[in-house]
Amino acid sequence: MLNQIVLVGRLVKTPELRVTDSGKKISTITLAVPRNYKNIHGEYETDFLDCTLWTNVAENTTEYCQVGDMIGVKGRVQSKIITQDDGTKKKKTEIVAEKVTFLAQAPKKEEKKEKETKPKKEEK
């Protein structure tokens, strides 16, 4: 049997590191992953997938990544039952990251402005 998932997408927001009551480091990220086909209206849709990162993976990702960066996530799909305050139970499915690969940084705001205002070189 196999429970493995590989995703490549962009971070929706800058990751934040938290510490659980038991002292483990954790970060929850949302990855925007565009679909590779168009819908009935001729547009590409995007899936927003929640990923949970633990210990060193969480530390490194929060230290080196920010909103818009492209990353690869290798992990497993996990589901759990959550009991809400009113007593109802809800099933939550998430991706638990086992490895994160930093693929490309989002252009910084200064770099974007510089590229937009920089005159193009004339070719002779």
Image (cartoon, rainbow, N blue to C red):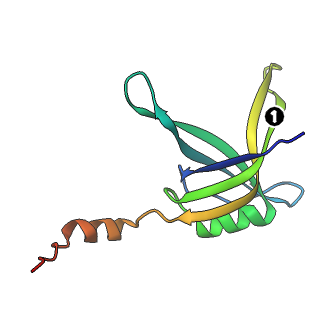
Tag count in the figure? 1
Measured as percent of width and height from the top left, residue 122 is found at: 11, 76
Q: Say left or right for 65 vs 25.
A: left
Q: Nearer the viewer, residue 101 or 68?
A: 101
Residue located at (90% from left, 56% from top): 22
The amino acid on which the numbered mark 1 sits, given as a three-letter code, is Ser
Q: Say left or right for 61 vs 117.
A: right
Question: Image quadrant for the N terminus?
Answer: top right
Q: Residue furthest left?
A: 124
Measured as percent of width and height from the top left, residue 79 is found at: 81, 34
Q: Nearer the viewer, residue 112 or 102?
A: 102
Residue located at (19% from left, 69% from top): 117
Label 1 SS: strand
Residue 95: which quarter of the image?
top right
Residue located at (45% from left, 62% from top): 106
Residue 112: which quarter of the image?
bottom left
Q: Residue furthest front?
A: 124
Measured as percent of width and height from the top left, residue 94 is found at: 74, 39
Residue underneath mark 1: 79
* Circle 1 crowding by C-alpha within 10 Å: few under 14, some 14–19, many from 20: few
Q: Say left or right for 67 vs 91.
A: left
Question: Image quadrant for the C terminus?
Answer: bottom left
Q: Is residue 85 above or below residue 101?
A: above
Q: Is residue 70 above or below residue 48?
A: below
